[in-house]
Image: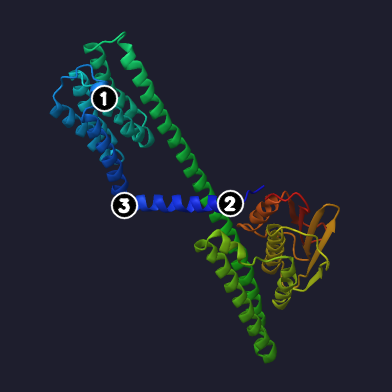
Amino acid sequence: MTTETTGPSRYAQRLMARVRAFDARRPWVWDAAVTAAWTVAALVDAAGGWRNTARDPSVPVWLVVTLSLFLAVPLYWRRRRPMAALAVMAGAALLGDGSGAFLQAAYLQMLPLFHIALSRPPRALLWSLALIVPSLVTGALRFPSESWDQRVVPALWAYAIVALLGIALRSRRDERAHEVRLAATAERTRIAREMHDIIGHNLSVITSLADGGRYAAAKNPERAAQALDAIGTTSRQALAELRRLLSVLHEDDETATRIPQPTLTDLEPLIDGVRRAGLPVHAELPRAAPALSAGAQLTVHRVLQEALTNTLKHAGADATATVRLSYGPGALELLVTDTGTPSRAPGRGHGITGMHERAARYDGTLETGPLPTGGWRVLLRIPLEDFPS
């Protein structure tokens, strides 16, 4: 089941996509904004608020201001050089805790630590721990309160939570990247299958028409002219289908869904095109059809197209084909048979594999193989309800 995206949600997604795109083009803007905001906060604290948490309020103000700058300014490089930024900030934190200033700006080390967990190998977190712990231990030992671990343990828990958050987001990002790669692979497979069906079928028809026109040119010029007209019509149809398919690659989802796909109403023109190519086809197509999803109708169309294409290519000059579309209890059945030689192996490439994949997409089945009396059979069954969305 698919869920529709609401208007505000879609707007928020587009806004976030634009923000991420802008940040990718100009990362310095966001880095500078974050650095400036935290630098101002650190300097405000250095103006006097730091004494509320200091163990030694007599630390010189110039030292507090200097350490505050060294704890805030390196944030500009927190995404590109997180280890270097953390190293500078850890040195300032060590001096601050060792002097007794105990600056709250030292907790800004969480930001480069987060980016280390997000973008660096796991062993980088061990180096981060080695940078962060000395300042905590030094402050706890030089200026003990009730217990030395009251300074160390809560801070380590805070840093650990930040690191775990970075790891969780990294795992989610990697999972989404994997999903994107799988989706891209599936889309490439789908496009390759569509290209195979469109080009393979239409080229087979054009080849048959060209061969027939060549033989008729000497004895029946009018028949040759008809073959040329049919070649032109088939070529234009193939180009139109290819344009439709390729347009999906550079259009958004809404535009792509408006591009018409072949349906059950296109089966008769498909069969007529094969007849013009020289293959006699007897068709039994019911006028009334049950409601089917667009994808299921496309599957029926492509399976019939592939089956007739294989007959054109492999069945021989004197072969005929029969197409029967029926609706049984709860299922659609498409049966395509021909009178060609059963020893052939049509569709050794992607044809039969693609037909099986299309049928499976709609919980259907596909049976192919030689007939006992000679010829070849393709039988497609698709349930008429409970189509996957």
Q: Residue furthest top?
A: 146
Residue 334 showing in the rendered view: yes
Apparent side of residue 349 relative to residue 293 in the rendered image (left or right): left
For the residue pair 331 and 157, the one nearer the viewer reads as 157
State the residue in front, 49 or 127. Answer: 49
Instruction: Give the quarter of the image for residue 311.
Output: bottom right
Asked if the residue under mark 3 is in contact with the one under mark 2, i.e. CB atoms within 8 Å, the reply is: no
* 171 shown above or below 161: below
Neighbour tally class for label 1: few under 14, some 14-19, many 20 plus, Cα within 10 Å: many
Q: Report how far apart the C-alphas of labels 2 and 1 lie in the structure.
A: 47 Å
Measure the C-alpha gap from mark 3 to mark 1: 30 Å
Marks 3/1 in contact by CB < 8 Å: the verdict is no
Name the residue located 64 percent from the left edge and 53 percent from the top edge.
353
Residue 35 vs 333, above or below: the answer is above
**Residue 355 lies in quadrant:** bottom right
**Amino acid found under the numbered disc labelled 2:** Thr
Looking at the rendered structure, the kind of residue marked 1 is: Leu
Say which of 373 and 132 sits in front: 132
Residue labelled with disc 2: 6
Local SS, label 2: loop
**Horizontal and vertical percent for residue 35?**
27, 40
Q: CA distance from mark 2 to mark 3?
A: 30 Å
**Residue 13 point in image, percent of width and height:** 49, 50
Q: Which mark is residue 26?
A: 3
The residue singled out by tag 1 in the image is: 131
* Mark seen at residue 198: none
- Which of the colour schemes (rainbow, by chain, secondary structure, one colour) is used? rainbow
Q: Callout 3: few (<14), some (14-19), or many (20+) C-alpha neighbours within 10 Å?
A: few
Task: Specify the farthest residue to the right.
Answer: 329
